[in-house]
Amino acid sequence: MASKNMIKNTIALILAINLVFFGFTVAQPPPPPQAPVCPRDIQACVNVLRTSVILNAQTVSRCCTLVAGLNASVASVCLCNAVRISLLNILTITLRLNQVLGICRITPPAGFTCA
């Protein structure tokens, strides 16, 4: 009788230890999210940022869909990099970029300047 209890206790101990070890392997945190990147066709926003285009929801909608999944700082930098090459007036770029972000309901970081 004692040997049956000993076997049951041993099996129970082995199962308990297995549960602990399996719990450690399952309890790993999920991998961190990938860093957001600029959309490939961000150049579509360059034409919107030219001074001859009137900024409104209709003219900016294509650009808004491109930056919709990005946080404010990444969206600001992406747009700045896209237009910095083709437009030279930095003050105008920053003002227009902030207007586009505003229309897209994205608040640029405080003190952001496209330079």
Image (cartoon, rainbow, N blue to C red):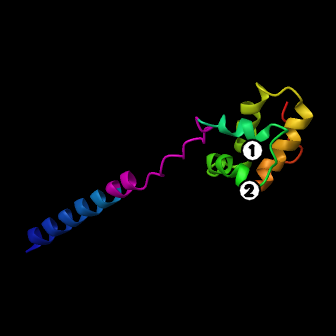
Q: Circle 1 sits on which residue? A: 73
Judging depth in this view, the residue of 8 and 96 nearest the camera is 96
Please give the name of the residue rendered at 29% of the width and 63% of the height, measured from the top-left corner. 16
Q: Is residue 113 visible?
A: no
Whether residues under marks 1 and 2 lie with C-beta atoms below 8 angstroms apart, the answer is no
Question: What's under tag 2, amino acid-wise?
Answer: Ala
Marks 1/2: CA–CA distance: 21 Å
Please give the name of the residue rendered at 76% of the width and 24% of the height, measured from the top-left corner. 85
Residue 100: give x, y in percent of width and height. Answer: 78, 48
Question: What's under tag 1, amino acid-wise?
Answer: Ser
Residue 21: give x, y in percent of width and height. Answer: 33, 54
> Magenta residues?
21-40
> In the displayed structure, does residue 99 sit left or right of residue 62?
right
Please give the name of the residue rendered at 83% of the width and 49% of the height, measured from the top-left corner. 99
Judging depth in this view, the residue of 41 and 8 nearest the camera is 41
**Label placed on residue 57:** 2
| Residue farthest to the right, as pictured | 91
Seen in the picture, residue 104 relative to 16 is either above or below; the reply is above
Seen in the picture, residue 17 relative to 79 is either above or below; the reply is below
**Which corner quadrant holds the N terminus?**
bottom left
**Magenta span: helix, strand or loop, mainly?**
loop
**Between discs 1 and 2, the one toward the N terminus:** 2
Q: Is residue 15 visible?
A: yes
| Residue farthest to the bottom, as pictured | 1
- Mark 1: give few (<14), some (14-19) or many (20+) Cα within 10 Å: some
Badge count: 2
